[in-house]
């Protein structure tokens, strides 16, 4: 405790009947007075503490008001001392309790040095955080005793975690300017890493050559949005990327073990993957991966229609998949806070290279958030996901739905404006990718003969439709609508709908687009 028990605080008996002094929230008025004295003595000290310290951080509200007045004068370019502040507090009743305007003069006269100003500010801020922790702990205890049908115990835990996270963010005061030399060294290290890998992949590999070439892999601290209309294959593509990243990590570990290499080498490709599936169950995702690996339709696997000759392939594929560092959490309606807690735990216990969330609109709003509309909720979610990517230093891939506006256009290729609640999603993301399969729309647009149409004309139109169908069959486009680190453009992949399988498109399969 920073100061002795005030004379007006009476002791109280404990369970044993002994008198125990009540605990006073931590504070140190002497340090607060010392900081104010340093600021009044030399206003340059304010620059050292203004980024860290706010008026509400002072335990004594009167000290906070003096600090606030000093800051206002300094920011105006005026001198802040006992004389210039006198008019602010000459008729201040609250300040009269400690001496009024004369108190300012005593503070200024008591100044010794400004060297300790930053240390004083850090101490005041630390005590403020401790008082906030006490308040949160008290609220947690009181709310735990309350039974609310609209909020169960898990909801109260998540709300408490959110408050603790918000407080922890306030406590992160290590930011500020970095010497350019350090940033330059980090950039050179990244380029060296790409060179050693004999390619342009510096982040987590997607497993698709052309996509990696465009993106350079999925970069740490990036928020990547993968969006598309229903049935375009968003989940299938995200699952395949997660699988490829986990497989690359597994193969690296096997090689490192065999050759005696360092397993934590930063050059290691891929990574441990956390897959939060808010729409599909873990069993459904596993079924998809199994279907893709053995090339047996997933619906036949669900119905048990597996031939005897295919069964050994199932056993082999299952054994291979079982060792992948791919962790699936299929808990529905998770909040960003819960995702953060579980991802942080996984990183601590198994490591973490990438997070995938299927999908963004199914995440619950932060606990305690006011219902101000869906746009505000999505804004809070995307900000939380971006903060999560930076905090854990991993790429976060979040799937997103598109609005129905796509269906109203003749060219149904998605655009950034098609994102639901597009403003916040587009703003907070580092990369936005769209999945588009023309085959899906083309197969549903088979021409029919018009009543007054000549048969030859109809056959000609139908022939063109068939030719275009052959061109777009099993072709998917990944459209890079936004990328902070590189160019936008389109990457073509092969998509086999029978097994919901994405793969690289062979060079011979590339065909020019047909323009009307």
Image (spheres, rainbow, N blue to C red):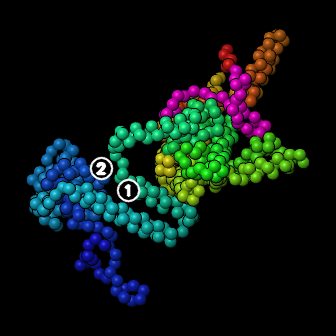
Please indicate whether residue 339 sits to the left or right of residue 19 in the image.
right
Point out residue 497 in the picture as x, y percentages from the top left corner: 76, 36
Q: Is residue 463 visible?
A: yes
Question: Quick one: 58 or 245, which is closer to the camera?
Answer: 245
Q: How much space separates mark 1 and mark 2, taking CA atoms? A: 12 Å
Residue assigned mark 1: 171
Question: Quadrant where the C terminus lies?
Answer: top right
Point out residue 169 in the picture as x, y percentages from the top left corner: 41, 54
Q: Please name the residue shown 40% across and 38% down the image.
A: 184
Residue 1, which numbered label?
A: none
The quadrant holding residue 395 is: top right
- Report the span colored magenta: 483-511
Helix, strand or loop at disc 1? loop
Q: Please name the residue shown 71% across and 48% down the image.
A: 285
Residue assigned mark 2: 51
Residue at the front extreme, as displayed: 259
Point out residue 223 in the picture as x, y percentages from the top left corner: 52, 42
Q: Please name the residue shown 60% across and 40% down the image.
A: 205
């Amino acid at each position: 405790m920073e100061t002795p028990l005030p004379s007006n605080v009476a002791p109280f008996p404990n369970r044993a009947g002994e008198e125990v002094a009540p605990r006073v929230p931590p504070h140190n008025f002497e340090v607060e007075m010392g900081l104010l004295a340093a600021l009044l003595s030399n206003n340059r000290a304010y620059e050292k503490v203004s980024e860290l310290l706010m008026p509400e951080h002072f335990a004594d509200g009167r000290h906070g008001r003096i600090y606030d007045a000093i800051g206002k004068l300094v920011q105006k370019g005026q001198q802040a001392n006992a004389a210039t502040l006198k008019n602010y507090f000459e008729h201040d009743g609250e300040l009269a309790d400690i001496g009024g305007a004369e108190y300012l003069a005593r503070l200024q006269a008591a100044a010794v040095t400004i060297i300790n100003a930053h240390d004083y500010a850090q101490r005041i801020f630390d005590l403020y955080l401790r008082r906030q922790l006490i308040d949160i702990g008290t609220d947690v205890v009181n709310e735990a005793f309350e039974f609310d049908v609209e909020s169960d115990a898990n909801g109260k835990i998540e709300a408490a975690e959110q408050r603790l996270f918000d407080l922890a963010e306030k406590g992160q005061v290590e930011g500020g300017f970095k010497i350019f030399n350090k940033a330059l060294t980090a950039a050179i290290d990244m380029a060296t890493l790409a060179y050693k890998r004999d390619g342009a992949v510096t982040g987590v590999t997607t497993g698709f050559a052309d996509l990696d070439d465009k993106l350079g892999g999925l970069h740490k601290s990036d928020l990547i949005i993968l969006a598309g209309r229903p049935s375009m294959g968003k989940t299938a593509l995200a699952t395949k990327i997660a699988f490829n990243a986990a497989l690359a990590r597994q193969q690296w570990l096997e090689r490192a073990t065999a050759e005696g290499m360092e397993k934590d080498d930063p050059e290691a490709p891929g990574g441990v993957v956390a897959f939060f599936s808010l729409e599909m169950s873990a069993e459904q995702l596993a079924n998809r991966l199994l279907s893709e690996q053995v090339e047996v339709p997933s619906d036949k696997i669900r119905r048990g229609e597996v031939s005897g000759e295919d069964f050994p392939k199932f056993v082999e594929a299952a054994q291979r998949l079982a060792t992948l560092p791919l962790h699936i959490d299929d808990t529905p309606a998770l909040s960003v806070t819960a995702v953060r807690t579980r991802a942080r735990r996984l990183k601590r216990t198994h490591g973490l290279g990438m997070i995938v969330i299927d999908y963004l609109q199914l995440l619950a709003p932060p606990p305690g958030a006011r219902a101000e509309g869906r746009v505000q909720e999505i804004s809070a979610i995307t900000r939380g996901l971006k903060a999560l990517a930076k905090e854990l230093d991993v790429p976060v891939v979040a799937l997103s739905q598109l609005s129905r506006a796509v269906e109203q256009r003749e060219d149904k290729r998605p655009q950034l404006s098609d994102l639901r609640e597009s403003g916040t999603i587009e703003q907070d993301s580092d990369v936005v990718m769209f999945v588009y399969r023309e085959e899906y729309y083309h197969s549903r647009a088979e021409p029919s003969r018009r009543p007054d149409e000549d048969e030859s004309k109809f056959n000609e139109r139908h022939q063109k439709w068939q030719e275009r169908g052959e061109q777009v069959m099993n072709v998917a486009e990944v459209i890079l609508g936004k990328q902070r680190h590189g160019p936008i453009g389109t990457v073509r992949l092969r998509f086999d709908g029978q097994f919901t399988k994405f793969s690289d498109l062979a060079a011979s399969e590339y065909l020019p687009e047909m323009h009307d």
